[in-house]
Image (cartoon, grey):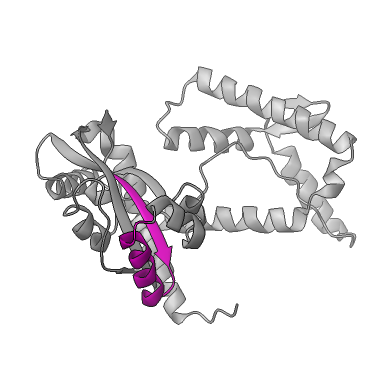
Amino acid sequence: MRIYLLRTQILGLIAPCFLLFASIVHGQTKPEASSVDKAEKKDAQIEFVATVNGAPITQGLLDLNVKAAVSRGQKDTPQLRQAIKEELINRALIAQEATRQGLDKEIDFRDQYTQLKQNLLLQAFVDEHFKKSPITEAILLEEYEKQKQAMGGGNTAPQYQLSQIILGTESEAIAAIGRLQNGESFAKVAKEISRDAATKSQGGLVGWVMVPQVAAPIADIMVNLPKGSFSTSPIKLQGAYVVIKVDDIRSTKIASFKESKNQIRQALIQKYLNESIKKLRESAKVVQ
């Protein structure tokens, strides 16, 4: 099995790119004549690639989705553009039918629009930074070699099947370790008390990971745990305390630089986002 080199402390801030269409809801105030004239002139300059029951699909919307597909590694070809156009047509048809059935009245467009706007601004924030400081081939290669060295520098590296219990305080983590030492199963304890919603229902199972994919404090403990054993001291991490278990260990082939480039690029983008968020939160006033 090939495992791609990744750093996966992902906050999930950028959703995977997908085909987008949006309805813009205007206010009820009638615009001035000059504004109408400008809008009509602008509309006249918009290029359409198709219409669906009279509703236009713009060249800009097609280009937006082609760009998203290319960013995921696909090639900009006539076949790709036609496939995306067909998908946009299909989505327009479904959207029209949903509207005909009155389903649009059940959707909170204000919140949906707010989320879409935030996602677009977030993407613009990322694009602006990397326009000024592009991720070059040399940077990607340096990061690849760094991660490869962290896994021993060879063509294969150990992979760990990891489970975790995440708790809010050190005393809770110590109590959880005590339960494990008294014979309770890791999965049972994780399901009952772990605060990590993503893994709790699976008994704390994270899955197969490699050293560069996990935070350093966890990696330092993980590599020294025999198969089937758990950490006997709480691991402090980002305001939480973690107990881990190494369920299994296996050897896996490290992917080549060419195979890993896209994943490394995404990881570097995420790293920049994480650092930016940390800096912004330090100076922000957040009330919950």
Q: Toward the viewer: 215 or 220?
A: 220
Quarter of the image where the C terminus is located: bottom right
171 in the magenta segment: yes
Asked whether residue 273 appears in the rendered view, the answer is: no
- Residue at 25% x, 64% y is 232
Is 48 above or below relative to 172? above
- Tell me where residue 154 sits by quadrant: top left
Q: Toward the viewer: 82 or 47?
A: 82
248 in the magenta segment: no
Q: Toward the viewer: 63 or 276?
A: 276
Q: Position of residue 164 (x, y in %)?
A: 37, 55
Q: Is residue 239 left or right of residue 234?
A: right
- Residue at 77% x, 51% y is 38
Q: What stretch of residues is rendered in magenta?
A: 161-183
Q: Is residue 146 left or right of residue 121?
A: left
Q: Position of residue 87 (x, y in %)?
A: 64, 26
- Tell me where residue 91 sits by quadrant: top right
Q: Position of residue 204 (x, y in %)?
A: 42, 52
Is 187 above or below relative to 5? below
Q: Toward the viewer: 257 or 177?
A: 177
Name the residue furthest top: 79
- Residue at 19% x, 53% y is 225
- Residue at 39% x, 62% y is 274
Quarter of the image where the N terminus is located: top left
Asked whether residue 281 appears in the rendered view, the answer is: yes
Q: Is residue 6 left or right of residue 78?
A: left
Q: Position of residue 151 (x, y in %)?
A: 15, 46
